[in-house]
Amino acid sequence: RQYFVNADDTVPEKVVVQKNSPRGVHFRRAGPRQRVYFEPEDVKACIVTCGGLCPGLNTVIRELVCGLSHMYNVNDVFGIQNGYKGFYSSNYLPMTPKSVNDIHKRGGTVLGSSRGGHDTHKIVDNIQDRGINQVYIIGGDGTQKGAYEIFKEIRRRGLKVAVAGIPKTIDNDIAVIDKSFGFDTAVEEAQRAIDAAHVEASSAENGIGLVKLMGRYSGFIAMYATLASRDVDCCLIPESPFYLEGEGGLFEYIERRLKENNHMVIVVAEGAGQDLIAKSIPVADQLDASGNKLLLDVGLWLTHKIKDHCKSKKMEMTIKYIDPTYMIRAIPSNASDNVYCTLLAHSAIHGAMAGYSFTVGMVNGRHAYIPFHRVTSTRNKVKITDRMWARLLSSTNQPSFLSKEDIMEAREAERLANRLPVPASSSEHTKKHSASVLSNG
Ligand SMILES: Nc1ncnc2c1ncn2[C@@H]1O[C@H](COP(=O)(O)OP(=O)(O)O)[C@@H](O)[C@H]1O
Ligand SMILES: O=P(O)(O)OC[C@H]1O[C@](O)(COP(=O)(O)O)[C@@H](O)[C@@H]1O
Ligand SMILES: [Mg+2]
């Protein structure tokens, strides 16, 4: 009995609030309920994985199958093959604790995954025809949008089906949740690429090691991998636009760093500098099957730009470019991600058994059931006005590439987005803080 959570428990979205500010948004706390909606013998569950790979997918699948069976005695569980399109184009695979017993040791997803192929009506027709009443959907921002569409159609048809989204995003770009499973593993694995870049760079005269890490719109992996490594001299992310030429630009910094230290390591997130590349190589936008913009290779582009610049300055140098993207994505999750995946799967099961539809996630350290629209309406991004980015700047000593106006503008946008009161802008502390950020430029 002590394991049950009170059905009225809530988890606040924001834990740091002002004394007189409103209570803010709260989510239902995740966990086992004393009263559940479904009878175990009536449950027919299915699991699908969509989008790009991420360490931990197999662990979530395993723990959903085992958790349903061991905690609720639910044994009718099916795997949907190759993402959303598998709902209407492939056989459903029966899954048992025995058949998933050791899958958490493997990378990827045993169910297969894909982009595109989301046809809400066909998917819900199949759910209805096959009598499925619990749908577990593991995937990123696009997948959660798809889950929301499925939920709305299920509600419109009045079906008694619970839809549970489990957010997967190696980029850590899903809003509201603390972090996604697989993120820790990705940061850890990125260290190997950074170490290799460092070895290559430091073993050459004027050596530069350049590593491209994942992050279409959010530079979290690049930021955390840089902070963890301490061998990185410059980290470039999509949220912080940079420039190459002139005072305070990347080339000037590279020249200085090579003069001081003979070598340097640069980490670049895949979505960084896209506007700069588009200016120098104008190409039409291309989309993947899910409608995501296909990015131009910033690592390759930067390699050529740096080489050309050094040549024009008659500087001898060597640059080695490493792109470990698929090597990072394909590994199994580490120990802490494995535990996180297990807890997420269990929270999802408890919520679905209670009859809720939601995206499950850790919010300020507690598991919660989050309405779909809250996670799909915005994207989690690195706030360059936060202390974490300031820490990074002071650890690498790279230029901030920002003017004072840029910083003020970003702060104001953030204040408005969070509906915070106008700060005492003339306070000494504020002045000193922005000065310390700027001093890196
Ligand atoms: N706005 C949307 N509405 C419905 N389905 C979507 C939407 N965006 C993406 N999807 C579907 O979600 C799946 C995964 O999306 P994708 O963007 O490739 O990966 P991720 O979920 O990892 O972000 C795809 O099958 C895609 O068709
Ligand atoms: O080459 P693919 O399979 O389309 O995947 C590339 C993309 O997948 C990711 O690793 C993850 O993206 P999603 O979470 O949207 O699936 C991105 O960082 C990267 O841009
Ligand atoms: Mg995505």
Image (tube, rainbow, N blue to C red):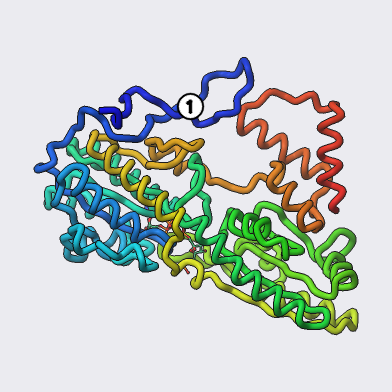
Quadrant position of residue 373: top left
Q: Is residue 306 visible?
A: yes
Query: Residue 48 at x, y = what percent?
Result: 29, 57
Quadrant position of residue 360: top left
Q: Is residue 121 left or right of residue 183?
A: left
Residue drawn at (28%, 34%) of the image: 32
Give the residue furthest to the left: 41
Viewer-closest of 31 and 288: 31
Give the residue furthest to the front: 2
Q: Amino acid at mark 1?
A: Val
Residue drawn at (78%, 38%) of the image: 408
Mark 1 lies on residue: 25
Viewer-closest of 178 and 67: 67
Query: Residue 257 at x, y = what percent?
Result: 85, 68
Residue drawn at (48%, 65%) of the image: 287
Q: Is residue 55 left or right of residue 87?
A: right
Quadrant position of residue 387: top right
Residue drawn at (21%, 43%) of the image: 71
Query: Residue 17 at x, y = what percent?
Result: 60, 24
The residue at label 1 has a CB less than 8 Å from ligand 1: no
